Image: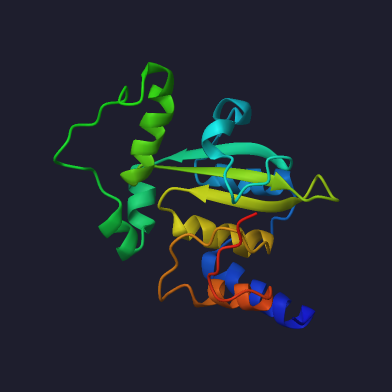
Amino acid sequence: MTDERVVSLLTAARAHYAVPQARTLPEVEALLRTWGAAELPLESFAPNILDEFVDASLAVSLFTILDAPLLRGRATAEEQRHFDADSIEPFDPNEYGTDQAEWTTYSHQMETLERAIIVLEAAPTQHDRVGNFRVYGAAQWLRESLWAATGIVPRDPGWPDANSYLFGEAFTLAGRDPFAAAPI
C-alpha cells in the first residue's frame, strides 16, 4: 500500500461522504454529535457490545444516534429490506427480563432503523487517537463516513453495497479482501 494512494483515497472519500478528517477521539466524538449522537455509559452496556469486533481493553466511549428519519433516509436498499419492524409479533421490552428491558429496547430500535450505536476504541500506542470503531445497527453510511474521517478500516464492514466502492478499496489497501471482516 502506498501512502500516496491512501491519501488520495481518503481525500476522495472525505469529499464523497462530506466529512472532515477526524483522527483523535475528541474529533470523532464531535463529528458524531453533528449527527445527533449522545454518549452512553460504556460500562453499563459492555456485556452487550463487547464482541469479536471490539477490543475490550481499548474501548473508551459509546455513543448512540436515535433518529429514525436520519437512519431510514440514509439506509441502503438492502438495509431497508432486512431491517424493519416485525409486524406479526408486538414488541415486548421485557421479553428477556426486566433487567434487560433497556438493551432489548435498544436492540429493537436498531432492528427497525431507529437507532445506531457506536463504540470507539483508542489506538494501542496513542490513546488520544481512534484505533477502531464498531457501528451496531443498519447504518452503513455511518461506517463508511467514520472510515473516511478516521482512515481506520473497521474490523466489521457491516453491509456494504454496490455504492461502497471507495470503502471496498480501503480494505484492499489495508491488505484485506474487499469488505472482509477481521474479528479479533
Depth order, front residue of 34/146: 146
Residue 76 lies left or right of residue 54; in this view the side is: left
Residue 65 lies left or right of residue 77; in this view the side is: right
Residue ID at (58%, 76%): 177
Residue ID at (44%, 54%): 139
Q: Position of residue 45 (x, y in %)?
A: 55, 30
Q: Position of residue 93 (x, y in %)?
A: 31, 25
Residue ID at (30%, 26%): 95
Residue ID at (13%, 40%): 88
Judging from the image, the colouring scheme is rainbow
In the displayed orientation, state which residue is furthest to the left.
88
In the displayed orientation, state which residue is furthest to the top.
98
**Residue 40's quadrant in the figure?**
top right
Q: Is residue 164 above or below residue 93?
A: below
Depth order, front residue of 14/128: 128
- Quadrant occupied by the N terminus: bottom right
Depth order, front residue of 20/83: 83
**Residue 39's quadrant in the figure?**
top right
**Residue 7's quadrant in the figure?**
bottom right
Q: Position of residue 41 (x, y in %)?
A: 60, 27
Q: Position of residue 6 (x, y in %)?
A: 71, 76
- Quadrant occupied by the C terminus: bottom right
Count of labels in the image: 0
Q: Is residue 116 above or below residue 141?
A: above
Q: Is residue 109 above or below residue 129?
A: above
